[in-house]
Image (cartoon, rainbow, N blue to C red):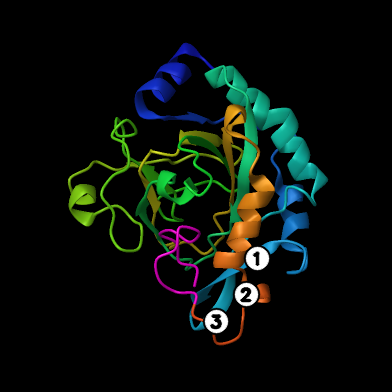
Amino acid sequence: MFSEEDINCFNENGYVLLTDFFSEEGCIPNECLEEIIEYPESEVFHYFEDVDNERKLCRTENFYNVNEKAKKIVDEKLIPALQELTNEEFFLFKEKINYKRSGGGAFNPHQDAPAYVSFEQFYHLTVMIAVDSMTIENGCLYVVNNSNKLGTLPQEDDGSIKRDWCNEQEWKPIVCPAGSVLIFDSYVPHKSDINKSDNFRRAFFFTFNKKSDGDYHDDYYQKKLELFPPDYYRVENKDYSGPNIFNLATPIK
């Protein structure tokens, strides 16, 4: 599955892009997404952002245990791929869909690592699956090469990376067709801009931790439910704004 060039890119930069991972007909997980978006708010975690003075669906999380298609993708495609790439075994830690609708907000430059320390785990891999083609216009991801070995970078109050550091870097756009997969570790700086196109830019993000670090998937979502619940579970008049490792550098309110 992985060429020597792929492995070298991952070892040097902490990420690798595979444009043909879901090239088999019918394998791009559109049907999986269409099922998940229809789940009621009592069954999965639907998060919203403010777009044009309206609450719009921004993200869905915590669907692995209720969607068989998602489980099949994770168990039969993603975990074996990560094991081949790293010679490590992995557990799923968390999962989400970012919908990135037209006008959907930017995600400020950040690393994932600071958001994942609740269970004393310090290394994760995320697999992004592009459901739609990713372009500069619709808000594709940007990364910084040769930066994942710098450890946790200085942060702003909202958990994003210090602007002074960001302004000195060359940000590389990850432009790719639908069905592409980007595997990146939790120290790779990344960001995305506002979607300026007329269409969605949807993507799955499945995050994994080493099996040796333990299985904390359900514990993670129980903790998130307490500290940054979706709208459906929120206490009326309670303020959920402010710095929160469960809502790091996102447009979600």
x 34%, y 56%: residue: 160
Percent across and percent down for residue 194 are 41, 62
- The picture places residue 211, in percent across and down from the top left corner, at 62, 29
Disc 1 crowd rating (10 Å Cα; few below 14, some 14-19, many 20+) is many
Residue found at the very far bottom of the displayed protein: 237
Residue 245 belongs to magenta span: yes
Mark positioned earlier in the residue sequence (1 or 3): 1
Q: Is residue 23 left or right of residue 68?
A: left
From which residue to which does the magenta span run? 240-253
Left or right of 3, for residue 42 = right
Residue type pointed to by label 3? Glu
Query: Would you say residue 213 is visible in this rendering?
Result: yes
Say which mark, if any, is on residue 76.
none
In this figure, which residue is indicated by the disc labeled 1?
46
Q: How far apart are the two marked residues, 1 and 2, measured between alpha carbons?
A: 8 Å
The residues bearing labels 2 and 3 have C-alpha atoms spaced at a distance of: 14 Å
Judged from this view, the residue extending furthest toward the top is 4
Q: Secondary structure at mark 1?
A: strand
Amino acid identity at mark 1 = His
Q: Earlier in the sequence, mark 1 or mark 2?
A: 1
The percent coordinates of residue 51 (x first, y second) are: 49, 76
Q: Amino acid at mark 2?
A: Asp
Q: Residues within 10 Å of mark 2 (few under 14, many from 20)?
A: some
Q: Residue visible at 43% across and 47% down?
A: 141
SS of the residue under disc 2:
helix
- From the viewer's perspective, is residue 239 above or below residue 67? below
Q: Residue at x 58, y 73 (%)?
A: 56
Q: Which residue is mark 2?
A: 231
Residue at image mark 3: 54
| Residue drawn 57% across the image and 16% down it | 87
